[in-house]
Amino acid sequence: MAKIDIAIGIGGAAGTRHRHAGDILAFIFARRGLSVNAYNAYQSIIRGGHTFLTIRTSDVPVTNQGDKIDILIPLNQDP
Protein backbone atom coordinates (compact mmCIF):
# COMPACT_ATOMS: atom_id res chain seq x y z
CA MET A 1 0.00 0.00 0.00
CA ALA A 2 1.34 3.42 -0.96
CA LYS A 3 1.98 5.90 1.83
CA ILE A 4 2.33 8.75 -0.67
CA ASP A 5 0.02 9.03 -3.69
CA ILE A 6 -0.64 12.56 -4.91
CA ALA A 7 -2.09 13.83 -8.19
CA ILE A 8 -1.57 17.48 -9.12
CA GLY A 9 -3.36 19.26 -11.97
CA ILE A 10 -2.00 22.47 -13.47
CA GLY A 11 -4.17 24.24 -16.04
CA GLY A 12 -3.60 27.41 -17.98
CA ALA A 13 -3.68 29.18 -21.29
CA ALA A 14 -1.46 27.75 -24.00
CA GLY A 15 1.78 29.67 -24.29
CA THR A 16 2.03 30.63 -20.62
CA ARG A 17 4.75 28.02 -19.97
CA HIS A 18 2.91 26.37 -17.10
CA ARG A 19 4.57 23.15 -18.28
CA HIS A 20 7.78 24.44 -16.69
CA ALA A 21 6.09 24.54 -13.28
CA GLY A 22 5.17 20.89 -13.83
CA ASP A 23 8.72 20.04 -14.86
CA ILE A 24 10.04 21.60 -11.66
CA LEU A 25 7.56 19.68 -9.50
CA ALA A 26 8.34 16.40 -11.29
CA PHE A 27 12.08 17.01 -10.82
CA ILE A 28 11.61 17.68 -7.09
CA PHE A 29 9.55 14.51 -6.63
CA ALA A 30 12.04 12.40 -8.58
CA ARG A 31 14.96 13.80 -6.56
CA ARG A 32 13.11 12.75 -3.39
CA GLY A 33 13.02 9.18 -4.73
CA LEU A 34 9.35 9.11 -5.70
CA SER A 35 7.93 7.61 -8.88
CA VAL A 36 6.46 10.24 -11.23
CA ASN A 37 3.99 10.12 -14.13
CA ALA A 38 3.28 13.35 -16.04
CA TYR A 39 0.73 13.82 -18.82
CA ASN A 40 0.22 17.02 -20.77
CA ALA A 41 -3.19 17.40 -22.48
CA TYR A 42 -3.16 19.90 -25.33
CA GLN A 43 -6.68 20.97 -26.25
CA SER A 44 -5.33 23.75 -28.41
CA ILE A 45 -1.81 24.54 -29.54
CA ILE A 46 -2.84 28.08 -30.46
CA ARG A 47 -1.75 30.65 -27.90
CA GLY A 48 -4.70 31.37 -25.64
CA GLY A 49 -6.25 27.89 -25.85
CA HIS A 50 -6.37 25.81 -22.68
CA THR A 51 -3.86 23.10 -21.75
CA PHE A 52 -3.78 20.87 -18.69
CA LEU A 53 -0.88 19.03 -17.07
CA THR A 54 -1.43 16.14 -14.65
CA ILE A 55 1.42 14.95 -12.42
CA ARG A 56 1.01 11.89 -10.25
CA THR A 57 3.67 10.87 -7.77
CA SER A 58 3.89 7.95 -5.36
CA ASP A 59 6.36 5.94 -3.32
CA VAL A 60 5.40 2.87 -5.39
CA PRO A 61 5.75 2.70 -9.20
CA VAL A 62 3.16 4.90 -10.96
CA THR A 63 1.72 3.40 -14.15
CA ASN A 64 -1.23 5.71 -14.86
CA GLN A 65 -2.72 9.14 -14.13
CA GLY A 66 -5.20 7.89 -11.56
CA ASP A 67 -8.84 8.91 -11.32
CA LYS A 68 -8.70 11.94 -9.04
CA ILE A 69 -6.88 15.24 -8.61
CA ASP A 70 -5.69 16.05 -5.08
CA ILE A 71 -4.30 19.52 -5.79
CA LEU A 72 -5.54 21.82 -8.57
CA ILE A 73 -3.46 24.80 -9.66
CA PRO A 74 -5.44 27.01 -12.10
CA LEU A 75 -3.29 29.63 -13.80
CA ASN A 76 -6.07 31.45 -15.61
CA GLN A 77 -9.78 32.16 -15.29
CA ASP A 78 -11.59 30.38 -18.07
CA PRO A 79 -15.27 31.36 -18.28
Image (cartoon, rainbow, N blue to C red):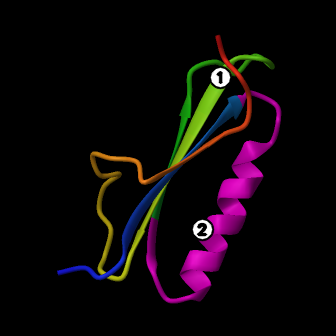
Which is nearer the N-term, disc 2 or disc 1? 2
Quadrant in the picture for the C terminus: top right
Part of the protein shown in magenta = 13-36
Q: Is residue 75 above or below residue 20?
A: above
Q: Which residue: 36% across, 77% down?
A: 4
Q: Amino acid at mark 1?
A: His
Instruction: Residue 28: give x, y in percent of width and height.
Output: 64, 77
Q: Are marks 2 and 1 in contact (CB under 8 Å)?
A: no
Classify mark 1: residues with Cα within 10 Å, few (<14), some (14-19) or many (20+). Answer: some
Tell me, yes or no, whether the highlighted magenta stretch contains residue 28: yes
Tell me, yes or no, whether the highlighted magenta stretch contains residue 63: no
Q: Which residue: 62% across, 30% down?
A: 51
**In the figure, is residue 62 to the left or right of 37?**
left
Q: Quadrant of residue 60?
A: bottom left
Residue pointed to by mark 2: 26
Residue pointed to by mark 1: 50
Q: Is residue 24 above or below residue 59?
A: above
Classify mark 2: residues with Cα within 10 Å, few (<14), some (14-19) or many (20+). Answer: many
Q: Is residue 29 above or below residue 71?
A: below
Q: Amino acid at mark 2?
A: Ala
Q: Which residue: 29% across, 82% down?
A: 3
Q: Nearer the viewer, residue 28 or 3?
A: 3
Q: Secondary structure at mark 1?
A: strand
Find the distance from the CA under tag 2 to the CA under tag 1.
21 Å
